[in-house]
Image: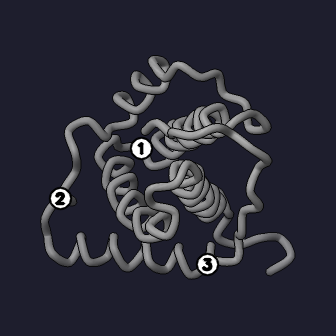
Amino acid sequence: MTSEGAGGPRPPLVWGWQPHLLGVVIAALATLSVAGGAPAKAADDTLQESQRQLRQFPFTPNCNGNTQEMVACLWQRRNQADQALQTVLGEAERLERWRSGRRQACEVVAEKAKGGSVYPIVWLSCENALNKELLRQLRRPLLQSADL
């Protein structure tokens, strides 16, 4: 998950696709559930392996830095959110199913940047946006006081 090329000004990120993308992820996860099988998962794509790889990444996380530093920052944020999700979801397998479906959805989103140095930034931004929304949904109370 490395990036090539020199870093420049931070590209503007468009967040208008979040609700649509969440629907794509939900549909992907539903398809996996209906199929009755565990999602295909790369052996090296667990949260623990991602954390290990990030420790070996030669760039310091800096969301305002060059391209590689931005990747490290977004990667670190993604791992932190995945750790929070693992706590909320309660089972490592649930998290890994989420990670697999999220990866598949964000591959589609990042396709437009494939081959460019912004590719991992688009990919990780997608994964972070989906994590943020899932955490918000999981932490939201069923009934809020304003609804009573």
Question: Could you tell me residue 129's position as x and y percent?
Answer: 62, 59
Residue at 38% x, 48% y is 95
**Under tag 1, what secondary structure?**
loop
Residue 39 occupies quadrant? bottom left
15 sits left or right of 56 in the view: right
Mark 2 surroundings: few (<14), some (14-19) or many (≥20) residues within 10 A: few
Disc 2: which residue: 38
Marks 3 and 2, Cα distance to the nearest angstrom? 25 Å
Question: Could you tell me residue 37's position as x and y percent?
Answer: 13, 64
Vertical arrangement, residue 111 with respect to residue 73, above or below: below
Disc 1: which residue: 90
Disc on the earlier residue, 3 or 1: 3
Q: Amino acid at mark 2?
A: Ala
Disc 3: which residue: 19
Vertical arrangement, residue 58 with respect to residue 121, above or below: above
Q: Amino acid at mark 1?
A: Gly
Does the CB distance between marks 2 and 1 fall below 8 Å? no
**Under tag 2, what secondary structure?**
loop
